[in-house]
Amino acid sequence: MQPFTTLTAIAAPLDVANVDTDKIIPARLLRKLRTPPDGYAPYLFHDVRRDADGRERETFVLNRPEYQNAGILVADVNFGCGSSREGAVYAMLDSGIRSVIAASFGDIHYANEIQNGMLPVILPEETCRELREQLHAKPGATLTIDLAAQTVSDTNGKQHRFQIDAVYKERLLKGLDEVGMVLQHLPEIEAFEKKHHGEHGWLA
């Protein structure tokens, strides 16, 4: 998993509350293979991004030229609610998005982002609205997220501090999933097993 340290990227404003995972990637598309190099990128926001004939809607923010290479989404409240599908995270990652800033997230989706090396940033609703207004005023502008410092720098250079669980922060900084975190302690685990079985031979 790629470590997440500092990210400076084009940020796209998504002025929609309660974006559920079916909107991020419709369920019927989860049967598709996540084939390199595009993976699930073609299916991100598929049904709101494209019309019935598959043509891109000019009105959808990620279809605008300024946001073609967006690495950050700035959303509203309750992003990633609904189904627990991990494919929603795959679709964003495969599209180059490493972080979503929102006022709140669906619980499982928040954990899924962490598990796959994305950083979900929770900021107050008013701050998210201000960030989106800045991005609308400066299409294609970048934001900087510093995980170690736990800050988001807006287009005016103002820093907004966010909170994150210490364990999640360590996992992202090191680029480790849950298994990777456990394997960091493999020598101690093996030493314990050796000692324990030596003292309780009947377990073997």
Image (cartoon, grey):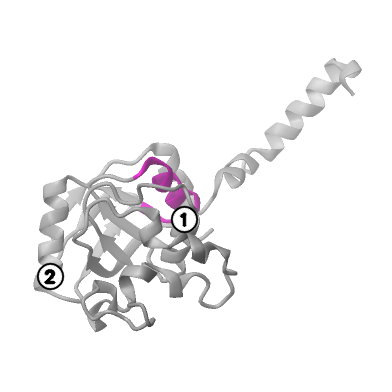
Pointer 1: what residue? 117
The correct choice, above or below, for 116 with respect to 47 in the image is: above
Q: CA distance from mark 1 to mark 2?
A: 27 Å
Q: Judge whether residue 107 is colored magenta.
A: yes
Q: Does 9 sit left or right of 117 as displayed?
A: left
Circle 2 crowding by C-alpha within 10 Å: few under 14, some 14–19, many from 20: few
The residue mark sitting in front, 1 or 2, is: 2
Q: Quadrant of residue 135?
A: bottom left
Is residue 158 visible to the viewer in this orientation of the structure? Answer: no
**Callout 1 secondary element:** loop
Pointer 2: what residue? 136
| Nearer to us in this view, 97 or 54 | 54
Residue 92 at what x, y percent from top left? Answer: 41, 64
**Residue at left offset 74%, top offset 26%:** 192
Q: Quadrant of residue 139?
A: bottom left
**Callout 2 secondary element:** helix
**Residue at left offset 34%, top offset 76%:** 50
**Residue at left offset 23%, top offset 81%:** 58
Residue 126 at what x, y percent from top left? Answer: 11, 49
- N-terminal of the pair, mark 1 or mark 2, is 1
Is residue 62 visible to the viewer in this orientation of the structure? Answer: yes
Q: Amino acid at mark 1?
A: Gly
Residue 180 at what x, y percent from top left? Answer: 60, 47
Residue 174: mark: none
Q: Amino acid at mark 2?
A: His
Q: Which residues are magenta?
A: 106-119
Q: Judge whether residue 128 is colored magenta.
A: no
